[in-house]
Image (tube, rainbow, N blue to C red):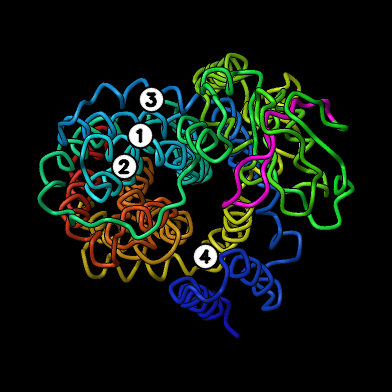
Amino acid sequence: MDPVIAIFVILGLAIIAFVSGKVPLAIVAIGVTLALWVTGIQTLPEAFAGFADPTVIFIASLFVISEGLDATGVTAWAGQQVLTRGGARPRRLLVIIGAMSAVLTGFISINGAVAALLPVVVVVALRAGIVPSKMLIPLAFTASAGSLLTLTGTPVNPVVSQLAESAGGRPFGFFEFALAGVPLVALTIAMVAVLGPRLLPDRTADRFDAAPDPSAAAQGWRESYAVDLSTRSLFSATDGVVEVMVAPRSTLIGRTVWSGMMTRDENLVILAARRGTTQPPHVSRDGTAGELTLQAGDAVLVQGPWAALERYTRSPDVIAVTPPHALRRTVPLGNGARRALVVLGLMVVLLATNLVPPAVAGLLAAGAMVLTGVMTMPQAYRSISWTTVILIGGMVPLSSAFVSTGAADVVADLVLGFTGDASPHLALLVLCVVTIVLGQFISNVATVLVVAPIAVSIAATLDLSVQPFMMALTVAGAASFLTPIATPVNLMVMQPGGYRFGDYWRLGLPLALVFLAVAVLYVPLIWPF
């Protein structure tokens, strides 16, 4: 089979698999890699070269940095400090939420920023008497805009930076994206604040499993265990409390416990215990309810250092009702927060000054998170979105094969045949429209990797700089506002907001048109053709 035809067949099948949603993204990416080798388009080392790409390594390290900030309560603290000043005025809250999510996204991953702010926004909205559906799509959309503030905002940014350099241009600076990102963030916040209350549904989710609220947890324990528990004494930067259930076949079965005694493992303090939900507690903090001989299913409150709680709940003897790490990340500026902020600051300095390549800066920062005790190696491994890493690693070879086989030139000729060579803006418009449309159904990273080689070919044919094309694709790739499947953060807010598939485009369409206008008209003013 002709290599160009083979590339289009592989690309077509990949897009169908992406859009169908029935095949996991990582499987599609691996299938693309294997197909490039089976068809003879690339050798095996070339087909798997994407997994050793420095950009992929850099993106993986960013997930570790994000987890370090989230796990130590940095994002929870930032969210509480800003959002609690919003009062009960919806538009003011939308502005504050938008600014907060955009800034956080600029320095940690977009998924991490939205995941950290999501429960805070829900709680603030409910306390202000506002349904969360008025707040959560704006949270996701402003986070997408904030991904254009720095190199680390989204995986697309380091990808286009590397593509620009490999195409004969130069890599983008760490804060260079902000030249387009700042006005887009301002426009996005203004639009969601003005149009959001009118265009978004007034709907309540049937069920939402939010991150635990320490105050709510303490109140629930006070009621179910009939003990006097103070939130401030339960949760701190160093210590916390978790509720565990005695597991079937646990070695704890038959052991008698009482308030104030220490656990056999990890030396945690037992605050209270109870059997069932209808009976009164058998053990309370002041000891008035006596002792309890444990059976499978009994619930126990234990208190101690966070690290000890983590080890204790991993024991097969107990089942954590809420994992310690989930409670710990809700404690503002917890243990290790200062170290995490110092590591983040040093990484930003390295990236902004170009002292070392981005992959090196990311690996150094991720390693520092572990070595300074901010997080453990298992936490670091779990924090990485392996689907994203495999997706990018598998699609990078397809992007390079698109160029090497001449397929990009074929598409570029078709675009230029339609637009002519007199107006680079028209060619840029076509590319950005294709990017926005595809980006509503498949990953924006995959979309940019497919369209970027075409943009490079058009720039070369017209003897133009590749910089405006790459930045415009970045802006268009961030305009994933029309469907809930366009980005993970759109899906993340769907259930807690009670949204339906058709709720997104009402606010998303005018916003996408703004992003398109910025990509085609504003970007070439800053990065001339």
Of the pair 156 and 88, the residue shown nearer to us = 88
The quadrant of the image that shows the N terminus is: bottom right
What residue does disc 3 label? 80
Q: x%, y% of residue 4?
A: 52, 76
Residue 278 falls within the magenta-colored stretch: yes
Lower position in the chain sequence, tag 2 or tag 4: 2
Mark 4 → mark 3, Cα distance in angstroms: 47 Å
Q: Which mark is residue 101?
A: 1
Which amino acid is tagged 4? Phe
Q: x%, y% of residue 306?
A: 69, 27
Callout 3 touching callout 2 (CB < 8 Å): no
Q: Residues within 10 Å of mark 3 (few under 14, many from 20)?
A: some
Callout 1 touching callout 2 (CB < 8 Å): yes
Q: As drawn, is 21 to the left or to the right of 132?
A: right
Mark 2 → mark 4, Cα distance in angstroms: 36 Å
Q: x%, y% of residue 146?
A: 35, 36
Question: Magenta residues?
Answer: 266-283
Q: Residues within 10 Å of mark 2 (few under 14, many from 20)?
A: many
What residue does disc 4 label? 402
